[in-house]
Amino acid sequence: MLQGINVVEICGIGPGPFCAMHLADLGADVIAVERGASTSITGEANAAANPLNRGKRSVVADLKTAEGRELVLKLIESADVLIEGMRPGVMERLGLGPEQCQARNPRLVYGRMTGWGQHGPMANAAGHDNNYIALSGALYHSGTAGEAPSSPITLIGDIGGGALYLAIGVLAGVLKARQTGQGSVVDAAIVDGSAHMMQLMMSLGSRGLLNEQRGKSVHDGSHFYATYRCADDRYVALGSMEPQFYALLLNKLGLQDDPRFAHQWDARQWPAMREAFATLFASQPREHWCDLLEGTDACFAPVLSPREASQHPHMVERDVYFERDGLLQAHPAPRFDGQVVTPGPIPTRGAHTEQVLGALEAGDLAGLWGR
């Protein structure tokens, strides 16, 4: 779907590479500019191919040298998008900020991925996903009363509030550039995106379903929207909010005549009902509850690991996961016209340096951007 959109990625960690991978998954031509050497988050040398680079081409350059900077500037002359994830001011100090790049290509969409944003008191502070969503308010309701909020790894911050907002921003910028000939600077901050993602939950406040006190709202305090441990130390998730779904859940559990559960929306009774549900679900293994509830309108699902999810009949039928080179991966999403797209291979670091340099020297744009 994005064939003909050319992207230069200044490689970093986390949401920037994921955004560029997502664009490549959808058909964009992405050239990833990587450092000559890499270290893992633990500080150890890491020469392994990066799964987030699937479908991209990898070029090695030292941006602190004149040669490295000129390579990037030559690439962006014919690119639609540049993506970078440095702290504010770093790209400017390298001579590769928006002003310098758009002087070479006024149509360029310059995508900036940060946690705190390009300005503000926190802009230059270090941080990670859980810090950003903590400050934005997105972490607050992730948990139950009496427990510390639990961060869902990178999903709300790095991916949801970061990478996907950057992807939407740069694609909107490309549309504008094609209409007006003028590029844009996209300031994608995880604090902004993750706060914006809270809009749906905050809309519950007008209906009295969002409480400022943790553990008192429908999503973090009710018995019918929660996860429960089973007898085999596996877990199941309920989301039986609507009255008809709740009634079916009670019927399936044999609790339809139990007066304790008669008033679904009496929040004063939620702790007691939640405790009763916890005792019930802990009495049987997960498989028992799957046999009883899965596939019904009780709004039920087992809590699966990615490996388990890849083997679930629904996920298998939809071909959501695949394995290549010993790595479990998810196919690109969303789908268009019902087609499952297999992404490109994962390149080794610098695998396309000679090819790209040769195309630049020859002025061969077809060779430079041809996938």
Image (cartoon, grey):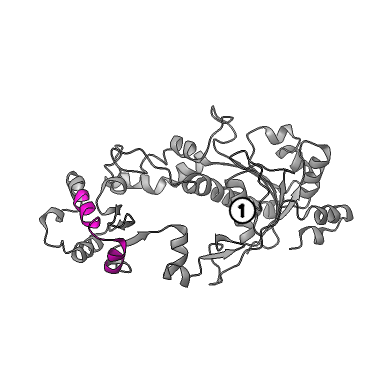
The foreground one among 331 and 164 is 331
Quadrant of res 24:
bottom right
For the N terminus, the quadrant is: bottom right
Seen at 22% across and 49% down, the residue is 274
The spot of residue 279 in percent (x, y) is: 21, 53
Residue 308 on image: x %, y %: 43, 62
| Residue at the top extreme, as displayed | 121
Residue type of the residue flagged with mark 1: Leu
Between 234 and 201, the residue placed more toward the observer is 234
In the image, residue 38 sits, relative to residue 78, either above or below, namely above
- Count the marks: 1
Q: Is residue 287 magenta?
A: yes
Label 1's element? Answer: helix
Dividing the picture into quadrants, the one containing residue 29 is: bottom right
38 left or right, relative to 268: right
Q: Main SS type for the magenta part?
A: helix
**Where does label 1 land, which residue?**
52
Q: Where's the C terminus, which quadrant?
A: bottom right
Q: Position of residue 188 (x, y in %)?
A: 57, 43
Compared with 147, 350 (above or below) is below
Q: Give coordinates of residue 122: x percent, y percent.
A: 54, 29
Q: Using residue 205 as the reference point, say whether residue 37 is left or right of it.
A: right
Q: Is 20 covered by the magenta stretch?
A: no
Q: Which residues are magenta?
A: 274-292
Residue at 16%, 53% (x, y): give it: 263
Mark 1 Cα within 10 Å, few/some/many (few <14, many 20+)? Answer: many
Q: Is residue 316 left or right of residue 86?
A: left
Q: Is residue 96 left or right of residue 155?
A: right
